[in-house]
């Protein structure tokens, strides 16, 4: 129930069409159950020898009731569609905005593929369920109640037949839900895995084709898809029992009412029940059972959608791991950085720490290089500076103040990070660059691109800075993408610039030109360069060597050649071994 309340908070401006839908539905049902009552009275009047004028007036009344019921149903359909589509829009918007507040640890908890499934498949299921809830889920119970009341008014004890079938129906639906729900839960979890597989395959399409592994990936997808089919078949097989159960209850009531009612008419000469009342009982019986059938369909739909509601509510109720402090600091004084006894784990269940015993002091304006093997936690270290993650113990300070005391936007505006995975969005080069500063002038764009050694290749395109970039930057090379990302980061005019292996795809000459530009044009900015090549960091003011989540050595190039075996080995492999790349 709490999950449903969470979803309904997003209803907002669509409360009015929801209420109108309920009003129209109640009016439609009332008019619909009124028609059999009028019909019974008409049959009785005919048997009593009523005039043609009286019959015509009754028929006109029936037509008016039918047309009014139809109009109410049409209006309910219109307002119901507005309400359900509006709720889905608001939930999708609220969910997207909530995801924007998530830290990396929140994203890690759900996974990207799962979040996509929740924003698409789950919200669609929820939208359909809401439409059914405000229309059919209201109409069917109201129809059931009104029809039962009218059946007792018209048929008296004959309506007991409906009372007998209702418990049977409820018990059957409860058993169907009990066994169907676990099957639907399993299906949604497998949907996440399937979407994750598709996302991974599409992103790595070049690798798949390069290794001619199309058949393997197709087989893997088919297996995952077939797994979902098996679970859905199991769930649908259980749900399909709903139909036979409904038909049994319907035919039982029809046979009982017809048999007992006919006998009463014949034996009592219409004193207990007459032909008109029997015909209305048949119609009411049909309405009651149709209402029950619709309720059973709603039950099945809600059984499916409740899992979707739960999954969407999980995201909306998720507390961001990183939030602003109560009275945040709104200004970063300089680019100095200090790590004090920092320990960090990605989760409380992690078997080992990603970082341990980190003590490091970086003065503002310094150029710092970080070297280390794969898995040495170089990227993890720099992600603590703009609070993409928070330390487990210890502290990280920027400008002499603990990063947890800053306003998040203020801190991240002062720290530009060019991550390992360069992301370019679809749109023009100008639009991509202005992610760094939406107010940047054309001159500032050009200046940043020259500094990042991107201006020349941009001008090589026929449309220059107005060149359209395809989704994912597929129409530019890896090195060009990296340089555009560096230029975008520079436009923020940060106090700290972090390059996380973001020149790996450019040649050594371009790499050197970029570093020379940094030294000349942004001397006051603290520059942290994570690299695999010693050449990229050997002229840094401070070089840090990492291994196993700890700092093994730090110093200048010359100092480390004398004091660090790891650094010396890397240097010799890349120079004397001739591997300059």
Image (cartoon, rainbow, N blue to C red):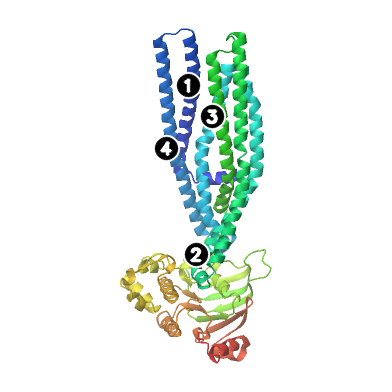
Q: Find the distance from the CA under tag 3 to the CA under tag 2.
A: 50 Å
Q: Residue at x 35, y 78 (%)?
A: 456
Q: Find the distance from the CA under tag 3 to the CA under tag 4.
A: 20 Å
x and y percentages locating residue 564 in the rendered image: 62, 87
**Vertical position of residue 227 compared to residue 252: above or below:** below
In the rendered structure, find residue 421 and report the number of the disc placed on it. Answer: none
Q: Find the distance from the CA under tag 2 to the CA under tag 4.
A: 39 Å
Q: Which of the marked residues, 3 or 4, is nearer the chain's N terminus?
A: 4
Crowding at dot 4, Cα within 10 Å, few <14 / some 14-19 / many 20+, comes out as some
Q: Nearer the viewer, mark 2 or mark 4?
A: 2
**Vertical position of residue 233 compared to residue 347: above or below:** above
Q: Find the distance from the CA under tag 1 to the CA under tag 3.
A: 15 Å
In the rendered structure, find residue 142 and report the number of the disc placed on it. Answer: 3
Q: Which residue corresponds to mark 2?
A: 202
Q: Which of the marked residues, 1 or 2, is nearer the chain's N terminus?
A: 1
Callouts 3 and 4 close, C-beta under 8 Å: no
Q: Which of the marked residues, 1 or 3, is nearer the chain's N terminus?
A: 1
Q: Find the distance from the CA under tag 1 to the CA under tag 2.
A: 59 Å
* Front residue of this view, candidates 268 and 300: 268
Q: Nearer the viewer, mark 3 or mark 2?
A: 2
x and y percentages locating residue 471 in the rendered image: 42, 65
Q: Nearer the viewer, mark 1 or mark 3?
A: 1
x and y percentages locating residue 435 in the rendered image: 41, 66
Q: Residue at x 53, y 85 (%)?
A: 534
**Vertical position of residue 332 compared to residue 84: above or below:** below
Q: Which residue corresponds to mark 1?
A: 35
Q: Which of the marked residues, 2 or 4, is nearer the chain's N terminus?
A: 4
Q: Label 3, secondary structure: give it.
A: helix
Q: Find the distance from the CA under tag 1 to the CA under tag 4.
A: 24 Å
Q: Which residue corresponds to mark 4?
A: 78
* Front residue of this view, candidates 80 and 448: 80
């Amino acid at each position: 129930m709490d999950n449903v309340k969470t979803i309904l908070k997003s209803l907002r401006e669509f409360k009015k069409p929801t209420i109108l839908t309920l009003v129209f539905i109640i009016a439609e049902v009332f008019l619909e159950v009124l028609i059999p009552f009028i019909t019974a009275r008409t049959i009785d009047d005919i048997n009593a020898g009523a005039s043609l004028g009286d019959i015509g007036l009754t028929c006109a009344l029936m037509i008016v009731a039918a047309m009014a019921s139809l109009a109410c149903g049409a209006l309910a359909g219109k307002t119901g569609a507005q309400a359900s589509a509006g709720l889905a829009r608001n939930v999708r918007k609220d969910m997207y905005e909530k995801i924007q507040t998530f830290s990396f640890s929140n994203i890690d908890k759900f996974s990207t593929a799962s979040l996509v499934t929740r924003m698409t498949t789950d919200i669609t299921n929820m939208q359909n369920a809401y439409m059914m809830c405000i229309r059919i889920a209201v109409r069917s119970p109201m129809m059931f109640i009104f029809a039962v009341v009218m059946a007792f008014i018209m048929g008296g004890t004959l309506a007991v037949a409906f009372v007998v079938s209702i418990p049977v129906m409820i018990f059957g639906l409860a058993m169907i839900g009990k066994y169907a729900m676990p099957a639907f839960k399993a299906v949604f979890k497998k949907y996440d895995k399937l979407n994750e597989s598709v996302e991974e395959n599409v992103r790595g399409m070049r690798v798949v084709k390069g290794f001619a592994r199309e058949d393997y990936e197709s087989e893997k997808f088919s297996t995952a898809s077939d797994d979902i089919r098996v679970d859905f078949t199991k769930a649908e097989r259980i749900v399909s029992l709903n139909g036979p159960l409904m038909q049994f209850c319907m035919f039982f009531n029809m046979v009982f009412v017809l048999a007992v009612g006919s006998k009463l008419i014949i034996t009592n000469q219409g004193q207990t029940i007459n032909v008109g009342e029997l015909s209305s009982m048949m119609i009411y019986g049909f309405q009651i059972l149709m209402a029950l059938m619709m309720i059973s369909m709603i039950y099945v739909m809600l059984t499916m959608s409740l899992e979707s509601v739960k999954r969407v509510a999980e995201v909306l109720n998720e507390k961001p791991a990183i939030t602003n402090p109560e009275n945040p600091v709104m200004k970063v004084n300089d680019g100095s950085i200090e790590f004090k006894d920092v320990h960090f784990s990605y989760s409380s269940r992690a078997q080992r720490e990603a970082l341990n015993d980190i003590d490091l002091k970086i003065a503002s304006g310094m150029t710092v290089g970080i070297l280390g093997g794969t898995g040495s936690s170089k990227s993890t270290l720099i992600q603590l500076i703009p609070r993409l993650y928070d330390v487990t113990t210890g502290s990280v300070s920027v400008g002499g103040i603990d990063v947890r005391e800053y306003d998040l936007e203020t801190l991240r505006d002062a720290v530009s990070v060019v991550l390992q995975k360069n992301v370019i969005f679809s749109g023009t080069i100008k639009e991509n660059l202005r992610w760094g500063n939406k107010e940047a002038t054309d001159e500032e764009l050009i200046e940043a691109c020259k500094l990042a050694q991107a201006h020349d290749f941009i001008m090589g395109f026929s449309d220059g800075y107005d060149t359209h970039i395809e989704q994912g930057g597929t129409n530019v090379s890896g090195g060009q993408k990296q340089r555009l990302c560096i230029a975008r980061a520079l436009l923020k005019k940060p106090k700290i610039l972090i390059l996380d292996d973001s020149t790996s795809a450019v040649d050594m000459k371009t790499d050197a030109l970029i570093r020379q530009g940094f030294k000349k044009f942004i001397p006051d900015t603290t520059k942290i360069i994570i690299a695999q090549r010693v050449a990229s960091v050997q002229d840094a003011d401070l070089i840090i060597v990492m291994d196993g989540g700890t700092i093994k050595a730090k110093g200048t190039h010359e100092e480390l050649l004398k004091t660090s075996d790891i650094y010396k080995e890397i240097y010799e492999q890349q120079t004397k071994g001739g591997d300059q790349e």
